[in-house]
Image (spheres, helix red, strand yellow):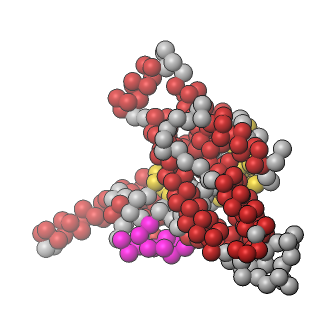
């Protein structure tokens, strides 16, 4: 089945599952029609008759009609999709890792209703949502480059990455994958509806979560901290999407562990991409931490002991400095 037909069927099925008006999609079918008209109408382009016959693809490097309809709309759609996906996933994970009174209420509700199953089902719907739109984005950009014999579509992907709205590179997708693996208790789990799967491989040489999707898309998310070169422990994702151990990120930002990343200077840079301002809204990867804790229990306990020891050492040094400053001795 061609992707256009599969995407149309997906949209029809999704209407029954996602009634939220904020749910947006890549306008794949409409944009494909725009490309078709662009390909068949040589008057829209600047090519001469000798350069382009009726059945030949346009050789222009850009097209004002397509550019106006494509890149501005796709950027907005991608931004809206990522925003919607992140808000829904955050809600699921917040319920799954609830604490305090909320945790008590959820446990009480489980006596009457299987909330975890509902959360897992919603998570699967969201994975299918982000995956189908990501495939639609890739295919329409590939078609754009084919019609116009350009690399503008590829360049647009790079721009999306730079602006942190590439659909399959949000840290919350890693969290959702870890949630799925934690729920199943297996090294891998199949994704209903899209013939995909999440799997996790933790060994001596590397730690990765793999996501396999249709259209030969295989994504590998590295779980190694770029600073300590070990499995991430108590991981945090910075605004740029890069993930580090909390202690390593604090060291890189010159803040103490007990203070947290929120005390980092606005001028602090990501140790990998050197982007400024990425410490303002760090995301605690609780599901990922739980996954590593369950799969590598001894390692996790060892890192916990080291972090606690370092935290207590920093607290002691901090209060000694405060006492010296207050007393002058």
Residue 309: image location, x then y, percent: 42, 55
Left or right for 260, reference 88 = left
Q: Magenta stretch: give its range.
A: 266-278
Closer to the camera in the image, 160 or 275 = 160
Residue 315: image location, x then y, percent: 31, 59
Q: Residue at x 51, y 54 (%)?
A: 80
Closer to the camera in the image, 203 or 329 = 203
Residue at the top extreme of this rendering: 112
Query: Quick check: is 274 in the magenta stretch?
Result: yes
Image vertical order of residue 269 relative to residue 23, above or below? below
The C terminus sits in image quarter: bottom left
Q: Residue at x 82, y 72 (%)?
A: 57
Closer to the camera in the image, 314 or 202 = 202
The count of marks equals 0
Residue 87: image location, x then y, percent: 47, 46
Q: Residue at x 72, y 39 (%)?
A: 9
| Any part of residue 326 in sight | yes
Residue 289: image location, x then y, percent: 54, 47
Would you say the magenta stretch is mainly helix, strand or loop? loop
Q: Quadrant of residue 319?
A: bottom left
Q: Residue at x 77, y 44 (%)?
A: 5
Residue at the left extreme of this rendering: 327
Left or right for 163, reference 153 = left
Image vertical order of residue 125 relative to residue 264, above or below? above
Q: Quadrant of residue 33?
A: bottom right
The N terminus sits in image quarter: top right
| Any part of residue 298 in sight | no
Query: Quick check: is 233 in the magenta stretch?
Result: no
């Amino acid at each position: 089945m061609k992707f256009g037909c599969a995407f149309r069927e997906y949209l029809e099925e999704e209407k029954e599952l996602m009634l939220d008006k904020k749910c947006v999609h890549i306008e794949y079918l409409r944009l494909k029609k725009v490309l078709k008209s662009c390909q068949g109408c040589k008057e829209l382009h600047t090519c001469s008759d000798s350069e382009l016959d009726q059945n030949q693809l346009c050789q222009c490097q850009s097209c004002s009609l397509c550019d106006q309809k494509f890149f501005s709309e796709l950027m907005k759609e991608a931004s809206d999709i990522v925003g919607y996906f992140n808000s829904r996933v955050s809600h699921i994970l917040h319920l799954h890792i609830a604490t305090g009174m909320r945790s008590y209420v959820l446990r009480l509700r489980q006596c009457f209703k299987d909330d975890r199953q509902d959360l897992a089902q919603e998570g699967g719907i969201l994975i299918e949502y982000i995956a189908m739109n990501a495939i639609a984005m890739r295919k329409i950009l590939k078609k754009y480059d084919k019609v116009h014999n350009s690399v503008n579509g590829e360049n647009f992907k790079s721009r999306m990455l730079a602006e942190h709205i590439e659909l399959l590179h949000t840290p919350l997708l890693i969290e959702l994958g870890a949630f799925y693996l934690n729920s199943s208790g297996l090294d891998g789990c199949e994704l209903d509806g899209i013939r995909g799967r999440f799997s996790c491989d933790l060994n001596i040489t590397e730690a990765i979560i793999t996501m396999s999707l249709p259209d030969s898309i295989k994504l590998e998310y590295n779980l190694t901290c770029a600073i300590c070169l070990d499995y991430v422990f108590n991981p945090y994702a910075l605004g740029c999407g890069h993930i580090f151990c909390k202690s390593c990120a604090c060291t890189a930002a010159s803040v103490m562990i007990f203070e947290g990343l929120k005390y980092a200077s606005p001028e602090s840079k990501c140790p990998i991409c050197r982007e400024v301002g990425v410490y303002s809204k760090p995301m605690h990867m609780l599901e990922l931490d739980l996954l590593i804790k369950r799969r590598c229990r001894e390692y996790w306990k060892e890192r916990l002991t080291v972090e606690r020891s370092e935290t207590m050492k920093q607290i002691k040094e901090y209060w000694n400095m405060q006492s010296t400053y207050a007393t002058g001795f």
